[in-house]
Amino acid sequence: MLITRRLEFDAGHRIPQHKSQCRHLHGHRYALEVTLSGEIIQTEGASEQGMVMDFSDVKNIALEKIANVWDHAFLVYRGDSAVLNFLNSMPGHKTVVLDSVPTAENLALAAFKVLDAAYIDVYGNQLRLERVRLYETPNNWADAVRGQIEKKK
């Protein structure tokens, strides 16, 4: 069985070498979808009976590990020294430094890597992360999918 939870957050970024508008500082209303697989819990009387995972638990983990960390932050590539120096000049600015350029693809992959360990078999029902979909806009998104990620390791 597959289940999916969607969360939204706001963040800024830029693509330093982009040939068009995305090389400028800007922001998005991102949406993050977390898809999990697992067996439906059949334990009589359990709070999660009939569920793969309680959607509020899916949400709370994704908030703690990704959405609250990235929300209202500027997501900046470690190699983008001009912007990194600028952001560091603002005391207390919420900056998240990433090892890759913050494209939708790289953000989806980074979120998958962080969330993968967080959802491992929480209830003993073979729960596991299958996909992270990151919407940069309502019409543009990237999917980090378990089978595709494992092939690249």
Image (cartoon, grey):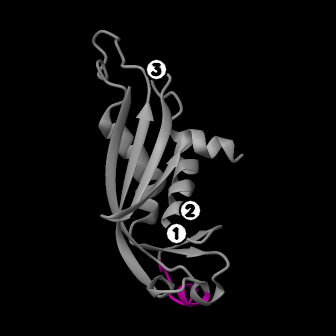
Which secondary structure, mark 1? loop
**What amino acid is labelled 2 in the image?**
Asn
- Residue 72: image quadrant is bottom left
Image coordinates of residue 146 in percent, x first then y, are: 56, 40
**What amino acid is labelled 1 in the image?**
Thr
Give yes or no for contact between labels 2 and 3 (Cβ–Cβ under 8 Å). no
Q: Which residues are magenta?
A: 85-93
The N terminus lies in quadrant: top left
Give yes or no for contact between labels 1 and 2 (Cβ–Cβ under 8 Å). yes
Q: Return the residue nearer the eye: 44 or 33.
A: 33
Marks 2 and 3, the one that precedes in the sequence: 2
Image coordinates of residue 56 in percent, x first then y, are: 31, 39
Which secondary structure, mark 2? helix
Q: Mark 1 vs mark 3: give the one in front.
A: 1
**Residue 88 on the magenta segment:** yes
Measure the C-alpha gap from mark 1 to mark 3: 34 Å
Q: Which mark is residue 106?
A: 2
Which secondary structure, mark 3? loop
